[in-house]
Image: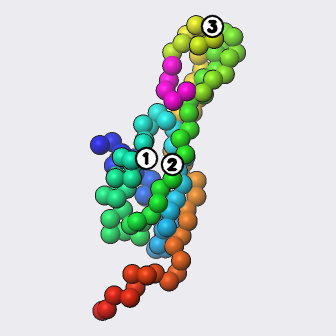
Amino acid sequence: MHEVGLVDGIVEAVQRRAGERRVAGFRVRIGTLHRAHQGPMDQALELVAADTNLEGAVMELVQIPVTMTCRSCATVETSEDVSAVCTACGSTDIDHAGGDELTLESVEYAAAAEPVASAAG
Ligand SMILES: [Zn+2]
């Protein structure tokens, strides 16, 4: 489950930004090469964020595709994977860019009044 490693890094980044504040949700720009699908990532987050200020936070993943520029015919296309062949001319002389980013875009904090604060003791 490689998602746990990914989410671990993301949670660390969120906590660096959030400090002690309770996090309601956050948005991450993630390249498709990370193979980070929402379902497994949510499960990983549940594990990693348990008993932290991120518990219950909603993670929004923005998938960033790979951009491929053909050096032969200058065709630019985006893909979810690294393709070795230009679909326009068949050339294998291709520049790949992106698809591997992992950027914390925004963090949304929970309201100061926490519903869980009513517990006695
Ligand atoms: Zn081409």
Disc 3 residue: CB within 8 Å of ligand 1: yes
Which residue is under mark 3?
Answer: 89
- State the image coordinates of residue 49 (x, y, percent, origin top left): 36, 62
Let me know if residue 111 is in the magenta part: no
Which residue is under mark 2?
Answer: 61
Furthest residue toward bottom:
121
- Above or below for 65 versus 107: above
Dot 1 crowding, Cα within 10 Å, few <14, some 14–19, many 20+: some
Secondary structure, mark 3, is: loop
Q: What main secondary structure does the magenta stretch of the protein show?
A: loop
N-terminal of the pair, mark 3 or mark 2, is 2
Residue under the image location 54 percent in, 12 percent down: 85
- State the image coordinates of residue 91 (x, y, percent, origin top left): 59, 8
Distance of label 1 from label 2 (alpha carbons): 7 Å
**Magenta segment, which residues?**
79-83
Dot 3 crowding, Cα within 10 Å, few <14, some 14–19, many 20+: few
N-terminal of the pair, mark 1 or mark 2, is 1
Secondary structure, mark 1, is: helix
Which residue is under mark 1?
Answer: 38
- Above or below for 79 versus 11: above
- State the image coordinates of residue 42 (x, y, percent, origin top left): 39, 53
Distance of label 3 from label 1 (alpha carbons): 34 Å
Q: Mark 3 or mark 1, which is nearer to you?
A: 1
Q: Is residue 53 visible?
A: yes
- Above or below for 34 versus 8: above
CB within 8 Å, label 1 to label 2: yes
CB within 8 Å, label 3 to label 2: no
Q: Amino acid at mark 2?
A: Leu
